[in-house]
């Protein structure tokens, strides 16, 4: 019995050397990809629609079109804006664990503000989340318990500057000089 893994190891490929390889997941080959940029780091979000794995030379169904995707740190969510949804369709996407995750894999999904059920499949480094996308849907929001950046570098730097300024002003002010007398 063979167990598929995400890495392959071969010691016989190159003489006297070990070689590692990673196979491409079928979604990386056949799906569409949205490149999400957060704090100068990019993440590939693979997505697709009903039939996107099928080869159909006589394409009779028009698929939805994704317009925009963004992280909303305050809500710990990913907001997806659809350009068009001509027919009710199955919509799925692969969510990297370092982009969004939920405690106990309990995401909340809303489509145009309405709570919606979803299917979820766990992979080693991401979740595949599938849903029914109603005709003319515009906004999809996936809410978790963590999104990148949970607490970015800018707030930490601002907090450090404020703390350093407060200490400096306390030492230079008359209040700060009175503190030395208390010692």
Image: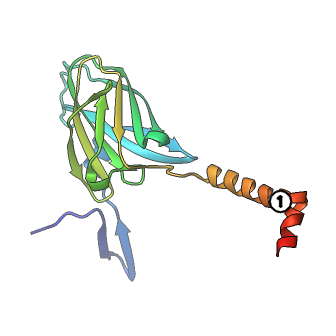
User: x, y percentage for residue 121?
Assistant: 21, 49
**Residue 123 visible, this angle:** yes
- The residue shown at (69%, 51%) is 158
Residue 67: name its quadrant: top left
- Of residues 104 and 42, the one drawn nearer to the viewer in this rendering: 104
**Residue 24 visible, this angle:** no
- The residue shown at (78%, 56%) is 166
Image: 82 above or below 41: above
Residue 141: name its quadrant: top left
The N terminus lies in quadrant: bottom left
The C terminus lies in quadrant: bottom right
Q: Residues within 10 Å of mark 1 (few under 14, many from 20)?
A: some
Is 50 positioned to the left or the right of 28 in the image? left
User: x, y percentage for residue 81?
Assistant: 40, 26
Q: Among all residues in the image, which is located at the extreme front?
A: 182
User: x, y percentage for residue 49?
Assistant: 24, 31
Q: Among all residues in the image, which is located at the extreme left?
A: 1
Image: 78 above or below 13: above
Judged from the image, the secondary structure of the residue bearing numbered disc 1 is: helix
User: x, y percentage for residue 112?
Assistant: 32, 24
- Of residues 45 and 51, the one drawn nearer to the viewer in this rendering: 45
Colouring of the image: rainbow
Q: How many numbered badges does the structure rendering display?
A: 1
- Of residues 11 and 139, the one drawn nearer to the viewer in this rendering: 139
Is 66 positioned to the left or the right of 128 in the image? right
- The residue shown at (89%, 65%) is 177
Residue 13: name its quadrant: bottom left
Q: Which residue is mark 1?
A: 170
């Amino acid at each position: 019995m063979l167990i598929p893994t995400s890495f392959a190891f071969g010691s016989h490929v190159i003489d006297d050397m070990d070689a590692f390889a990673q196979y491409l997941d079928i979604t990386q080959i056949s799906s569409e990809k949205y490149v999400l940029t957060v704090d100068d780091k990019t993440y590939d979000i693979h997505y697709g629609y009903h039939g996107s794995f099928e080869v159909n030379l006589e394409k009779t169904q028009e698929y939805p079109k994704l317009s925009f995707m963004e992280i909303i740190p305050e809500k710990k969510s990913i907001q997806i804006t659809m350009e068009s949804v001509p027919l009710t369709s199955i919509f799925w996407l692969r969510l990297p664990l370092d982009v969004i995750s939920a405690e106990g894999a309990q995401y909340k999904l809303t489509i145009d503000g309405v709570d919606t059920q979803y299917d979820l499949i766990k992979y080693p480094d991401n979740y595949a989340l599938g849903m029914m996308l109603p005709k003319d849907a515009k906004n999809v929001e996936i809410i978790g318990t963590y999104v990148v950046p949970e607490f970015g570098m800018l707030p930490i730097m601002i907090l450090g500057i404020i703390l350093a300024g407060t200490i400096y002003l306390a030492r230079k002010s008359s209040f700060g000089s009175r503190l030395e007398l208390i010692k």
